[in-house]
Image (tube, coloured by chain):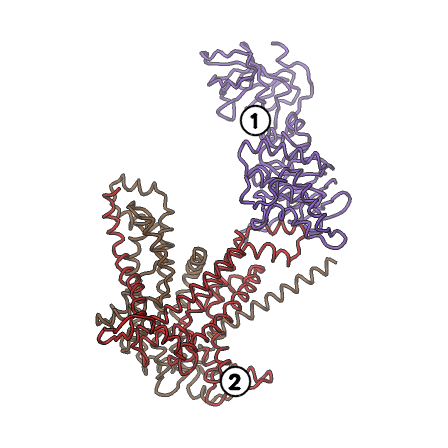
Amino acid sequence: MKVTLENVTKKFPSRTKNSPDVIAVNKFDFEFPDGKLIALLGPSGCGKSTTLNLISGLLKATEGKVFFGDDDVTELAAEKRGVGLVFQNYALYPHLTVRQNILFPLQNLRGKDKMSKAEMNSKAEEIARLVQVDKLMERKPNELSGGQQQRVAIARALVKMPKVLLLDEPLSNLDARLRLQTREEIRRIQKETRITTVFVTHDQDEAMSISDMIVVMRDGVVQQTGLPQEVYDNPDNLFVAQFLGTPPISVFDGTVKDGSLYIGNDKVLDGVCADNANVTVGIRPEGYILKEDGALCCKLRTVEVMGRDISVVSSNDFAKSADIRSIISSENKVDTSKEYVRFNLRREKVFLFDKENGKRIRFCSEKGGVENNG
Amino acid sequence: MDKKSPKALLYLLPSLLFLGVFLVYPLIDVFVYSFEEGYNSASQTSFGTGLYNYSYVLHDPYFLQALKNTFILVIITVPLSTILSLVISLGLSSIKAVRNLFQTVYFLPYVTNTLAVGLVFMILFKPTAYSDGLVNLLINTFGGQSVDFISGPYWAKMFVLCFYTIWIVMPFKILILTSALASVNKDYYNAAKIDGTSKTRTFFRITLPMISPMIFYLVITGFIGAFKAYSDAVALFGTDLNTQGMNTIVGYVYDMLYGNSGGYPSYASAAAIILFAIVLTVTCINLIVSKKNVHY
Amino acid sequence: MKNKTDVAATALKAVTYIFLSVWALIVLFPFYWMILTSVKGYGAYSNEYIPKFFTLSPTLENYTTAFTAVPLLQYFLNTLIFTLLTTALMLAVIIPAAFAFARLEFRGKNLLFTLILSLMMIPNELVVITNFVTITNLDLRNTFTGLILPSVMSVFYVYLLKESFSQVPDELYYAAKVDGTSDFRYMYKVLLPICRPTVVTITVLKVIECWNSFVWPRLITDEKSYFLVSNGIQEIRENGFGRENIPAMMAAVVAISLPLIVLFLVFRKRIMEGVARGGMKG
């Protein structure tokens, strides 16, 4: 079932008396497509968890509407919406066994939805098999590992066949290895059940790797939505460009002058038909090409060999951060005795942003990149 | 490490001295007393050892009366105060406005002098020169007959004692239960809400099991406290509890020790050990029951 | 349907508030009654056919009576001396002990600590008998020494303080050691200030306990000049003011209760936290 948020705003009263209300979510307007895995991504405090709770119904929107399919559920209480919610700390009832935890939502059903004991049990076991906890049914939560608890929590959320599955930072309480494993698991479960799933995360890697779609948020405002790769390749603003990608994008002060882009005195790109202005330049790590007579000159600091790739760490007076990380293929040889290293740039990996508001300035033409010269 | 031991001992010495003289030695001694027959506190002599003290105490009508009173008090006040405090705590945690004020007010009896406030209860229930007292006035307005609560029938006196005992023990229970309720993670309630769990079911399946350790803690300490009741009875009925028929086991112990009927530390010791045995048994039963019912 | 649930919720809320208010009334009413009675004239009170819920002619004469007809001031003074000395002595005794358990290393530490903790379970009634005999044999009846000494130790507070001391990071201790600070100096210059909240809580709880103590003073004093307030009020109740003077008795009750209520209102948070902690640790 698709979920639509229509201009949803959530304000919280401020803690102190005279300051204005805190706007946690500001005019959220987006349609979560049916049967997809969508990530709400952003730094902590960006309003992503609030958004999740607006969908679950645990919070009521201050303004705007929430639709499940075509039904307006804005005023509907959480228990009537038919959502499954997995909490960051799992919130498994510690005094109940895994089986009792999974059965718990089913035992709440009344009236025509009421199930017989046998039905409930077979349902619970089916779900337990799906998330692979069927061998742990009689254990208590404190006898399970973090990953197992997570699966049980998902099972509990799924057992009543929710219209929407919501996961709040599902992987943040797991160690690195389990995190990789569990995120694949979430992907698989979502694919098998085809339930529209929204999960909240601050880890862009996590969001990029498993979701069908990502929604990047900052300070309560949606920055960009789209397919993960699309957003990565084509960020709308500096924040999105910086938030996505590891190693992070390197940022420079630059100038557009007569169709060329300069970083300091180095003319790094031709054929830039933007207006003459000082701009912020973002270059993805994979946008650097090592070249002896390259356009951009940086001071070489170290070289880290990472198997298939080499990571060149250098610095530049016009860079906004101390280190510039560039990823190049290990076929290249870097002469570490030299003081400087020079790069040409891949045009499609270079983004220009407005110096004031960080908005993307798009190139109008495709031809005439410097890399063609090399 | 060993050369540090003497220094540590220096820090511990005062405590150990106090504990030894006023806690450990008396503990051993009380058993000795209880088996010494015919101990005379003036000449500090006895003429034999045995179970005579216990048998005397167990056949003393005053002791039996005290035993009965204590048991009635325990059986009435422990469940009532626990349930009442649970209901009040639930009410408290469901409101926001003036919650702090209520909490402060509810805690007041904890810091009051049991003897002093007991007198207030006494005058509330006691007839004055020309009236039957405030509580009787209340009973009369609802069409009931006046009752002499302070020196009248047994059940009336027991009622006042139970009422005052509950009034005194409530603050502690309310405080413990409200903090227990507050420490239940809100996510459990949210999870239950998402699943459409009814209020009753949430209470019995989530809230109650979650705070069950604290409830059992309160029941256990409640039993221990109620078995040791004494000051509240003194406050309401005076020190001569035996003639009033309102003595408690602890009161019996003290009466045997000192006062008009005092001077019998052996009988007092025997009675105190009987009390200790009762409390220990009840606590063990409580612990066994709680092992079966407390979930984590 | 939405309206229906709203109405139900509002009704529930109203019932909750009414219920809570009723209990608040039950708690507060005795206090109100004691203050009210204490300002009613003796004649006015005795001549009431129906108890009055207010008085139009409040008087302080009962307070004068309470402080002149019986040695109430003496009781206060005794209680004050008893409370201060007992509390001070307790702190002096348990702070080093808690420090030793929290910080020093010595053989059998854990065993000793467990043994001391298990003493918490011993009911006072068991040990009072021997203490009574001991104090009597030492001829310490009707002395402050006899009153205070057996009341000093509180195992539970040793435990509470030790827990608090243990939470202070080791680094502070080592830093102090490197600077050549003695253990004792570290204890009262570093540990005590850091753990001040716990020390304050323990002090206040002990003060309340001392102020209200009744059983031990009753056993050990029979001269009025050594009575504490609890025994004093009992004495007033039994032998009164020559006649049954309830308003004067209530004035004494108010006077006795007031210091504690003020103390409670000042240290409300500390007291409630301390008592709740006691509950959690059992």
Residue A356 visible from this viewpoint: no
Place of residue A266 in the rendered image (x, y in percent of width and height, measured from the top left)? 55, 16
Local SS, label 2: loop
Closer to the camera in the image, B24 or A307 = B24
Local SS, label 1: loop
Amino acid type indicated by mark 1? Thr
Closer to the camera in the image, C251 or A170 = A170
Output the letter for the chain in purple.
A
Instruction: Give residue C244's quadrant in the image.
Output: bottom left
Q: Nearer the viewer, mark 1 or mark 2?
A: 2
Chain under disc 1 = A
Output the letter for the chain in brown.
C
Residue C250, relative to residue B171: is it above or below?
below
Q: Which residue is mark 2?
A: B147
Place of residue C29 in the rendered image (x, y in percent of width and height, measured from the top left)? 50, 74
> Is A291 on the left-hand or right-hand side of B223?
right
Q: Which residue is mark 1?
A: A246
Residue A226, relative to residue C58: is it above or below?
above
Count neighbours of disc 2 (C-alpha within 10 A) and say few if under 14, some if 14 to 19, many if 20 or more.
Answer: many
Residue A107 visible from this viewpoint: yes
Closer to the camera in the image, A49 or A129 = A129
Q: Across the whole image, how many numbered discs are drawn on residues?
A: 2
Place of residue A335 in the rendered image (x, y in percent of width and height, measured from the top left)? 48, 11
Q: Estimate the spatial distance between the alpha carbons at disc 1 and disc 2, rounded to whole Å.
A: 84 Å
Count neighbours of disc 1 (C-alpha within 10 A) and say few if under 14, some if 14 to 19, many if 20 or more.
Answer: few
> Is B237 on the left-hand or right-hand side of A356?
left
Q: Residue at x 62, y 55 (%)?
A: B202
Q: Quadrant of the N terminus of chain B?
A: top left
Amino acid type indicated by mark 2? Val
Colour seen for chain B: red
